[in-house]
Amino acid sequence: MSDRPLPTIYPETQFYWDGARDGKLLLQSCPSCDKAYFPPRPFCPTCGSRDVVVSEASGKGRLYSYIINHLPAPGYEPPFTVAVVMLDEGVKMVANILECPADPQALILDMPLEVTFEQRGEIAVPQFKPAGDAA
Amino acid sequence: MSRASIAIVGAAETTRMGKVPELSQTGLHADAALNAMADCGLTPADIDGVATGGHDVAEIIQYLGITPTWYDGTSVGGCSFITLVRHAAAAIESGLCRTVLITHGESGRSNNRSHRPIFPSMQQQEFESIYGPLFPPSRFTLPVMRKMKDDGLTEEQLAMVAVVQREWAAHHPRATMRDPITVDDVLNSKMIAWPFRLLMCCLVSDGGGALILTSAERAGDFPTKPVYLRGMGGESAEGPMISQMESFTSSKAFRVSGKMAFDSAGITHSDVDHLMIYDAFAHLPVYGLEDLGFVKPGEGGAFVAEGHTRPGGALPLNTNGGGLSYMHSGMYGMYALQEGVRQMRGVSPAQVPDAKLSVVHGVGGMFSAAATAVLTTEDRW
Ligand SMILES: [Zn+2]
């Protein structure tokens, strides 16, 4: 899997990837809007405040949408699932769904998911899999 | 009573489309530009404004030998050219230039070019591409399963979009794909990115197109039948990360752009005789019909499946066959405009009888941006 694409990490997003390396999914949120947001940036996209905080996400979410990709991608064996996960914190992010067949019968919209991490060389990539009590 | 202020007086596509290995991408721009200038009897010396997307506008200016007082290189993907129509109109109205050439050329199939036409997005690479959706068919389609669950959109309805557009393409000698297809043909075609099959995805072509705009009061100086802009058109953008769309069942950029175009033109949906909605994939006309307000949210798929957009239907849509059947170079918006112009000139091979008003709506990137233009045969309303 180490030939899968690697993220180009920038100063503003380093904390996110450092967190993933430590097994934590980190999200930023704005205390005055009381709202988490994604992807990372050092200000709130709702109100523009730079006064934002980083905290560990619950790691829980649900399957919001997906495709089963039959096109090639480095390090991937098609067909594979590309999903959008809706986190319990109310933000959406892309992930593959691990430990689950790339099959519409197995990929039920709104099914509960939990975060896991996939190692790509030195970089840990946040991923999702069916939640423990549902698997 | 309002009077038109801007007219499209020149319009043409490249001499050949589909597979054009003998021309570079720059050459496709030039071929289209020279055809559009010939269409209305102009030479490069008559042009003082130049606009293009997905290619360095200064290179087009140099290649064609133009000395402009205005240029615009807005590059937000396939709707750039629709956006540039309204930018050009604003430039002419404010006196920045008099005669604008908008060019598009794209060597999408032969790849005779030095760079990709859409700027790479840094956050899209960092937080989406690493999960493997590297090509448009596996990115642009990401919201659709959500729409199917929330709105009841079906695979068969998506297939009907392709079937109906093939019916339109059959009228067009220049369309790449003209043979009739059925829903079963679409559903049995190669799986690309579930639930999308090959025939729900656009073609990959070489080609180009160009438009020439000037003030409406000069329209009589040209040999062509003028096509007027009504209102200011519209544009908006939501951004290149499709996973961050506010809604997966509706495009905010479509809604904002469409509303501005309709409001500024002072038209209602029943005024629209002809409609183009950029269809890189089969779901886009569904989103477009809903977000432009032709049908209620969630009713776009059924509207197409019931035949309202097919030849003879009440709302002729994508009458060249669209990106699914006519051609799709990568940034298709220019071809949607060209068909809108043909319909308003009354010369489309799939002519809508007595069509007086055409709405041309396009997407840029993967639901990243949008633009809308309202074209009409009438110089006052
Ligand atoms: Zn805030």
Image (spheres, coloured by chain):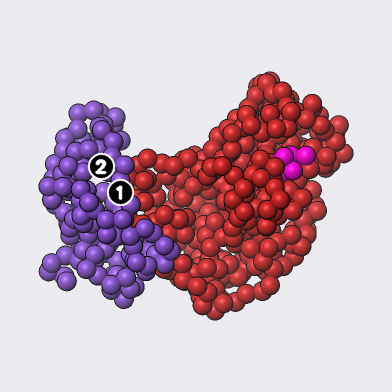
Do residues under tags 2 and 1 come within 8 Å of each other at their CB atoms? no
Residue range corresponding to the magenta coloring: B30-34
Within-10-Å neighbours for mark 1: few <14, some 14–19, many 20+: some
Viewer-proximal residue, B92 or B117? B117
Which amino acid does the dot numbered 2 rest on? Tyr
Viewer-proximal residue, B81 or B340? B81
Mark number displayed over residue A37: 2
Which amino acid does the dot numbered 1 rest on? Leu
Residue at x 56%, y 42% (from the top left corner): B114
Marks 2 and 1 on same chain: yes
Rendering colour (chain B): red
Residue at x 79%, y 26% (from the top left corner): B45
x, y percent for residue A63: 27, 62
> Residue under mark 2: which chain is it in?
A
Mark number displayed over residue A6: 1
Q: Is residue B360 left or right of residue B244?
A: right
Residue at x 34%, y 66% (from the top left corner): A77
Q: Quadrant of residue B26?
A: top right
x, y percent for residue B237: 46, 40
- Please, what is the dominant secondary structure of the magenta stretch? helix
Q: Quadrant of residue B147?
A: bottom left
Q: Is residue B48 above or below residue B109?
A: above
Is residue B208 in sight in this rendering? Answer: yes
